Each structure stands twice: as C-alpha cells, then as structure tokens.
Image (spheres, grey):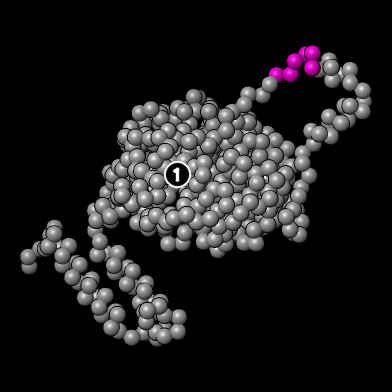
Amino acid sequence: MKRIGGARWQRFAILANLRFIAYVIASKEPDEGEGNVCGIGIVKRVVLAAALLTIVAPEQVSASALLSAESLARHGLVRAWARQVQLDRSRDRVSDLVLAEGLLLVKTRSGVVHALDAESGRTMWTIQVPGRNLVGFAPAANGKFVAVVQGLTLYVVNRADGKPAFEAELSGSPSAGAAVSDQWAYVPMQDGRIMAFKLDEPDGRPWLCRGTGTPEVPPVVTPTSLVWGTSRGFVYSNDLDKSGIRFELSTGGPVATPLASRPPAIYVVSDDHFVYALDETTGAILWRFATGSPIRQQPVAIGDSVYVIPIGQSMHCLAAATGDEKWSAPHCVQFVAASGERIYVTDGIGRTWILDAATGARLAAISTELLPHKLVNIETDRIYLATPTGMVQCLHESALVEPLNHKPPIEEPAEEKPADRESDAEKPAGDQRADETRAEPAAERDNADAPPAAEPQP
C-alpha cells in the first residue's frame, strides 16, 4: 500500500473531513428543534467545531492569526513585531506568557522557555527546563534571574543569557509557580508552606513560613512585603527576607485568584464574592466591594482605578482609594492592557474590545479569536497575543512609540530625623493623640449589606 504524505495527505484529510461534516449536517439527532441554532443541535455544533479545527493546519492558523497592518490602522494600532517561537507543533503548545520588566517569557507545556525582548521581539535565549513530562508552572523574573518550578525542583537561570544559576529540590509538592523579589525566590507548597530561597546563595538553607490552607496561586511581592491567599480563605503578609507573619485576615471564601498590588494597598478577590482593599502593612480593610458572583480573573490596579471581572457579569472599574464604582462594561472575560485613554479586554469568543477608559463605552472590536493567549499586562500599555503553536505578536497604539509604564516609582522610606523626634516629644498630649488618630487604618466601608467574614478555621 502506497503511503500518502505531505500536501497529498493534507488534501486527503480535508476532503475526508468535508465529507464527514456533510454527513453530520444531513443526519438527524434528538435535540434538533428546541434550543438549536440554524437547525443544528448542540451535539452537532460540537462535532462540527472539532472537525473544522482539524482541517486547518497549524501553519495556516499561525498565518491567518497574523493581524494585518490595515485592520490595525483602522483602530489606531500598529504591530510592533511578530515572532514565531520554535516548538514541536505535533505535540507541544504554548502554556504561559509572562512579562517581567521588559522581558517577555513564553513557556510551553514541555518546559521550553523562550526569552524575548518585549519591545523588539528579539529572541534573547531559549532553554529546555529538565523534566519535560512533569507538571510545570509559569516562570517569574527579576532584574538578574528567571525562576521556573518544574516537577519537584526550582530551576533558576541568569536573565541575561539563560545559563543555569542553580537548582533546588523542594521538600514536597508545589501548588503554584514561583514569585521573586530582588534577592529571594518564593515557592508555594501544597501543605500551606512558602519556601524562600536566596538567589545569590544557592547553597543556603531556605526559610519557611506557613499559613492555613493551600496557596493556589503565586504570592505577590511588593517592595516591603510578601502577600498570599489560601484555599481556606486566609490572606497573609510576611517580611521579604525572614519568616515572620505580619497579619492574618480571614475572608468568607477561598482565595484562588492572583492578588494585585499598588502600594500601599493589596487587592484581594475571594469566593465570598467580595473585592478587598487591604493595607499591606497592617492588613486593615480599607474598603470592600460586593460583586454578586465569584471572580476568576486577577484584579488589575492601574493608576487610580482597579478593574475586576466577576464570572458572567460586567467588568467593574473601581476607584482605587475608595472602592466606589466608576463604570461597568458588559460581556468582558479578561483584562488585556490599558493606555491613557483606552482599556483593552476580551469577550467570551476571543475578540478584543477597545473601551473608553473614562466611561467604559465600547469603541471597536478586533478579531483575535485565533490568538487565545492574551497576556494580562499590568506593567505597560503593550498588547501581547499568541497562538497555541507559538506565533507571538506585540501591538500598541500608533501614538505611543515608547511604552507607557504603569508601575509606580518605588519610594524609599524616609529616615526620621533626630530633630523630628525631639519635636514630637515636646508636643502636648492632645496633639500626640491627634497624630495617632490620623495614623490609624481607614475603617472598613461596604457598598452593600453583607454577612460578616468567616471566623478562622482550626
């Protein structure tokens, strides 16, 4: 029997699928009629979608997913670059996109990590993390290192060239990917611990901190704190360089979504259907907002706004300082990016919508259904999209040649002068009490009646 290969095999597969589609359409099924769309029942639609996907080769999908300059120009956008990362298209797929201070990390299911310059798309290095068949998590990076958890091992490589720095065995099963500060890598574990490894002392002994419940997402690192939530509904804050819990807060449901940070506040979403704004040092509740349904998307804090997207509802734009709702936009499932005047989100079928940043009104839609990987960009205005087979694109508004940085500048704590301490000591008792009152955390304010948070579980 003669083998069919190459283009002949592709033509044969397309013809076979077309015949199968015609057969499915012509056949009858019990659910025809009620609930059908265009006379095609639910089962038929699922079968047709699967068959149609097999007709298009991965190369054709990548080519058709490349957004044209003309279509982008109609919306005031340009494509800065497009890059096809190398992977085995027969078995491997893109799993994660991570942006870290100008470095775009593209990780695949088999543990291949591609490091691209976020502005030019130039490939800086590519590595295969050991344990390609083991469970892996999204990478994390700082100015010197990139950390990846694969299997039961933490792998750390140099950010500049991808060369190995060190690897550390984990004493248990990790529950999420690593987070990094300037000096430490933090790995959440299934048993509730956070393991901390010093990046410039690979042979040093890690220190541990523990909470009640499993951390299901990486902790968030601020300039002064390590903060994480757990499956038992608790939120913890710890010092960056040693074990020492600063506060423990109990919410009314599991915290299974990444936290957001914009000092001095931490923004937490819980399965109790609330968004919490916490003081990152004391854990005081600054405000909370009731959404009415769970939230599975990370809250995004940019400028003076916080964006949250509950399941099956609108995206809410909240005032970061007070929690008051500024506006809401329907049918949003993911935040993508923001510029000064626009917000970019996706809907349920993968289109990217352009919203007015001031009102939330819809301005236009971009056809990005073939680009299911959309980075949640909390750092800049750039839009990063990718196909499962590794075609990565970067878009931005034509007027924004340089990236618009959303990260607030890090302010070093001011040292108290001896003269200030003396003047405080000389103040009358009444003046000292007034200063203490002003320093207290803001009282909790609710936008709706709600039951009290659950008590800590033993």
**Residue 38 spot, x, y in % from top left:** 37, 79
In percent of the image, x 57 and y 62: which residue is there? 313
Magenta part of the chain: 415-420
Type of amino acid at the residue the image marks with label 1: Ala
Mark 1 highlights which residue? Answer: 138
Residue 65, magenta (yes or no): no
Going by the image, does 293 lie left or right of 166? right
Q: Is residue 220 above or below residue 51?
A: above
| Crowding at mark 1 (Cα within 10 Å: few <14, some 14-19, many 20+) | many
Which residue of the protein is positioned furthest toward the left in this rendering? Answer: 2
Going by the image, does 47 lie left or right of 253? left
**Residue 231 spot, x, y in % from top left:** 61, 53
Asked whether residue 429 appears in the rendered view, the answer is yes
**Residue 184 spot, x, y in % from top left:** 54, 30
Q: In front: 413, or 340?
A: 340
In percent of the image, x 55 and y 53: which residue is there? 360
In percent of the image, x 92 and y 28: which residue is there? 430
In percent of the image, x 25 and y 78: which residue is there? 22
User: Tag 1, which secondary structure?
Assistant: loop
Q: In this view, does 412 lie above or below 30?
A: above
Which residue of the protein is positioned furthest toward the right in this rendering? Answer: 429
